[in-house]
Amino acid sequence: MPALNETNGIRDASGAKMRLEEEICSLISEVQDFNLSTIERIELPSPLDFHRYVASNRPVIITLPPTATTTPRADLPASEREWSWPAFTKWTNEYLSSTLGEKHITVACTPNGWADAVVDDKYFAMPCEKKMTFDQFLDGMPIRMRRPDQKEEVNQDQEGKDTVVDPYQEVRYIQLQNGNLMTEYKELMDDVPASIPFASEALGKEPDAVNFWYGDERSTTSLHKDHYENLYSVIAGRKIFTLIPPTEQFCLHEKQYIAATYVDTTDTPSPSPSSQTETPSPRYKLEPMDPLTHTKWIGLNPAHEPREDLYEKYPRFQWCQPFRVELNPGELLYLPAMWYHQVEQEPDHEGKCIAVNWWYDMGFEGERFATAAFMSNLVQLVDQIDVSS
C-alpha cells in the first residue's frame, strides 16, 4: 500500500482533477443553454447582419437567390446578377476537362479517402500528394465520373448489384489549400467571385485564400479546426458538416499521434503473389516521418461511429452536442474560426462533388482567441494530472 502521504497526494490529485472537469462541463452546459440548438438558415444578409453572427461566433447558412444556380447572369436583374456564378452551370466534367485537361495539378491520394486523419489510434496519416494532369485525375475516379470516351468495367457484388471496378485502388481528392484557385486553377477564377462582398465589408478585409475542392463520396475530412473565418459554397453535389464549437474541446480527447505519410508501393513493385489464394500487398503503406514527429489531432469520428461506441472509447464526448448540417448548391456556410468540423460528401448525377471556399484571416483582438487558448491549456492541464502514482 502507498504511504499515508502518498495516499493523500493521490486523493488530492483525484479531487482536483474531478473539480476541474466539473467546472469545464458546467461551462460547456451554460454555453449550450444560452445558444440556439440549430444552425439558422437566412437569406442574403447585410454586412451588419452578417457581423452579428461573427460577433456571436455562430455558424449560419446563407441562401443565395433561387435563380443563382440555374439562370445565366445576363438574364437576371442587377440585384441578383452578382450571385449568379457561372460555376453553377458551367462546371461539368466535360467543361473542366476541356479547360484543365492537360494541366498538371496536385492530387491527394489515400487508400480509403481519409487524409489528415488518425489511423489505428497511433498515426496521424497525411495523403500521398501526386502530380498528374486533370484528365488523369478524372481517369482515376469511379467510372461514373470519368470522361465520356472511357469504357465502363462493372462487376456484381454478392447481392447481384452492379459495382464499379477501381483498377487504381486509391481514392483521389483535390484538396490542396492555401489559395489553389488562384494558382493551379486560375483558369476557373472568373467563374466564381474573388470575395464575398458582405463578408469582406463586415470583416474589413479581403480573403487570404480561395480554395477549389473536387472529390466523391469516398473522401471524408476528419474532425479538425482552422484559424480562418470560412465562407464555404457547394457548386455541385452536397456537403454534410458535423460542427462542434471551440468551448467543447474538452469533449474531443485530442492527443499526440505519430505523423506519417501514405507511400504508394507501386513505385517500387513487390513480387507477384505465388498463388491465386495469396492476397496481394496493399497499394499504400504508412511511413512515419523522419525524424520522428508527433501531431496533435482528434481520433473520434462523430459522423460514422455509433454514439454508444463513442461514449465508451471517449467518455467525455457525452457532454458534446454536435450540429449536423447539409449544404447544397446555392447555399453558403459561414464557419467561424476555431469551430471543429468534419465534412462528408454526396455526389451529383455525374458522381462529383465540387466546392469553393473563401478563407478570411481571423481577428486576434478581443477575447475569443485568448479564451480558446485558455480552454486548450486547461484541458491539457486536466490530462496531465496523474492520479495513479
Image (cartoon, rainbow, N blue to C red):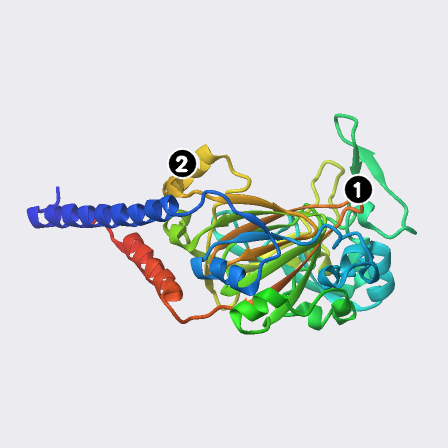
Q: Position of residue 69 (x, y in %)?
A: 76, 53
Q: Residues within 10 Å of mark 2 (few under 14, many from 20)?
A: few
Label 2 vs label 1: CA separation?
37 Å
Instruction: Name the residue located 79 percent from the left edge and 47 percent from the top edge.
Output: 167
Instruction: Name the residue located 47 percent from the left edge and 65 percent from the top edge.
Output: 292
Q: Quadrant of residue 261?
A: bottom right
Asked whether residue 323 appears in the rendered view, the answer is yes
Tell me: 187 left or right of 56. Answer: right
Q: Which residue is mark 1?
A: 165
* First-in-chain label (2 vs 1): 1
Q: Which mark is drawn over residue 312?
A: 2
Tell me: 247 left or right of 66. Answer: left
Q: Amino acid at mark 2?
A: Glu
Q: Which mark is drawn over residue 9?
A: none
Q: Give the secondary structure at mark 1.
A: loop
Q: Position of residue 284 (x, y in %)?
A: 65, 53
Q: Give the secondary structure at mark 2.
A: helix
Asked whether residue 301 appears in the rendered view, the answer is no
Q: Which of these two is toward me, 269 or 341?
A: 341
Q: Quadrant of residue 137?
A: bottom right
Q: Amino acid at mark 1?
A: Val
Please tell me whether residue 296 is drawn above or below residue 346 in the rendered image: below
Q: Residues within 10 Å of mark 1 (few under 14, many from 20)?
A: some
Instruction: Name the residue located 39 percent from the left edge and 63 percent from the top edge.
Output: 368
